[in-house]
């Protein structure tokens, strides 16, 4: 693919192939080691110049090219240093794709700017991850919910609490409070915390790694970013030194910023205990049933603890009577799959209003996710809408 892309460029860059034999038009990594390097002065760079293009996850629609500068990335890494106890000699296990914001900063930026090391995984496997952490004495991991769930199961199976681990930061997908508490209890030397962020404003919150209750029940405090909701509850608007400098295609910027220069995330949240953020879901995911608003993430975070549920995603489907209905797509645990009545009863026991309970249950073997672990709800809706049709 890279050969095809560079062949179309007027001034193609030098492409270095790290492993395997390099095609004739490219350079092998080993040949670089033996190539004489002429002495040259380092170039003078504009710290506000664009130095990186990262693409959004593309869970709905076309991925956008997010532009970051030297300064925005440097601010981000300084934030991690200050809030996540990253010290020279620490080692990050990087299970996330390095073309994603959640992998690139730990693979490239932290080693360069903080003196940490990165241990990369070609393909995620929780059992392998346990052995890699033990062998390399990895201290930090940041990844989406499936990584934490599976690592916890694998560590329990291997009979190790991974005492080398200092921090597990969980974000990028819905994270249940019970998972954070369970992992923090088991990985007794590690702080485990939820966080919130985006490719546009990376690590908008830094979690609450030193505050176990808020680490599980909230997405933490803001780091360097400023956050407004327009009230106690509302859409998250964020800005700060780590925010993007723009999009690759300027037309993508239409409607992306408010009048004060805050990035409009499209995510909904509320404040608790003055300055802790709780993300309640995407504005576009809200289900409007008979005029009542239902936030799927709120219900997912409760139902994930149902004994018959291993994974769950709640989506809105068209309904001629109520406008929309809430459908729970469930990957069942080893127990009998739950039905609508079971879910409604469980929610009522938790004090949840009856109208928020799903009206339909669909059992799947797995939920569609992207490489970063996010559930692709638009694929679920498309499949179920086609089926209903």
Image (cartoon, grey):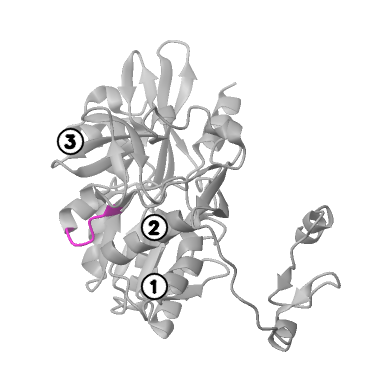
Give the residue at the far top of this rendering. Answer: 321
Q: Magenta span: helix, strand or loop, mainly?
A: loop
Look at the image and tell me whether residue 363 can be seen: yes
Residue 275, quarter of picture: top left
Secondary element at image label 2: helix
Q: In this view, does 369 lie above or below 363?
A: below
- Residue position for label 2: 76
Residue 45, percent across and down?
A: 55, 62
Q: Are marks 3 and 1 in contact (CB under 8 Å)?
A: no
Mark 2–mark 3 Cα distance, whole angstroms, equals 42 Å
**Mark 1 highlights which residue?**
114
Q: How crowded is mark 3: few (under 14 residues within 10 Å), some or many (20 or more)?
A: few
Residue at 48% x, 44% y: name it. 375
Residue 341 sits in quarter: top left
Residue drawn where x is 47% and y is 24% of the image: 317
Return the residue nearer the eye: 359 or 267: 267
In this rendering, is residue 323 above or below 138?
Answer: above
Quadrant in the picture for the C terminus: top right
Q: Name the residue under label 3.
A: 349
Question: Could you say whether the residue bearing mark 1 is in a helix, strand or loop?
Answer: helix
Q: Nearer the viewer, residue 1 or 354?
A: 1
Quick one: label 1 or label 2, which is nearer the N terminus?
A: 2
User: Magenta span covers which residues?
Assistant: 206-211
Q: Is residue 186 above or below residue 170?
A: below
* Image quadrant where one finds the N terminus: bottom right
């Amino acid at each position: 693919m890279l050969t095809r892309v560079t062949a179309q460029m007027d001034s193609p860059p030098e492409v270095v192939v790290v492993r395997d034999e390099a095609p004739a038009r490219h350079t092998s990594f080993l040949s670089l080691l033996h190539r004489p390097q002429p002495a040259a002065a380092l170039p003078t760079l504009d710290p506000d110049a664009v130095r990186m293009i990262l693409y959004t996850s593309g869970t709905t629609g076309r991925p956008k090219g997010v532009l970051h500068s030297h300064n925005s990335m440097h601010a981000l890494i300084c934030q991690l240093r200050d809030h996540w106890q990253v010290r020279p000699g620490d080692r990050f296990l990087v299970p996330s794709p390095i073309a994603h914001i959640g992998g690139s900063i730990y693979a490239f930026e932290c080693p360069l700017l903080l003196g940490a090391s990165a241990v990369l995984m070609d393909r995620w496997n929780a059992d392998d991850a346990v052995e890699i952490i033990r062998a390399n004495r990895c201290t930090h991991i940041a990844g989406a919910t499936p990584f934490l769930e599976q690592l916890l199961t694998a560590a329990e199976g291997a009979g190790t609490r991974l005492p080398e681990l200092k921090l597990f930061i969980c974000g990028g997908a819905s994270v249940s409070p019970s998972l954070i508490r369970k992992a923090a209890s088991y990985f007794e030397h590690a702080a485990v915390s939820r966080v919130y962020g985006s490719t546009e404003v990376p690590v908008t919150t830094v979690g609450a790694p030193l505050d176990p209750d808020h680490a599980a029940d909230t997405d933490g405090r803001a780091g360097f970013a400023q956050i407004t909701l327009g009230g106690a509850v509302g859409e998250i608007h964020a800005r700060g030194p780590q925010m993007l400098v723009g999009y690759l295609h300027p037309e993508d910027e239409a409607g992306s910023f408010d009048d004060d220069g805050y990035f409009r995330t499209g995510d909904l949240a509320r404040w608790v205990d003055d300055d802790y953020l709780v993300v309640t879901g995407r504005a576009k995911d809200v289900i409007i049933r008979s005029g009542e608003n239902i936030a799927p993430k709120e219900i997912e975070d409760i139902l994930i603890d149902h004994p018959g549920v291993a994974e769950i995603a709640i989506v809105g489907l068209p309904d001629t009577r109520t406008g929309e209905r809430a459908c729970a797509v469930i990957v069942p645990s080893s127990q009998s799959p739950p039905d609508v009545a079971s879910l409604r009863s469980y929610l009522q026991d938790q004090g949840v209003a009856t109208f928020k309970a799903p009206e339909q249950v669909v059992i799947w073997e797995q939920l569609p996710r992207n490489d970063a672990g996010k559930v692709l709800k638009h694929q679920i809706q498309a499949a179920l809408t086609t089926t209903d049709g």
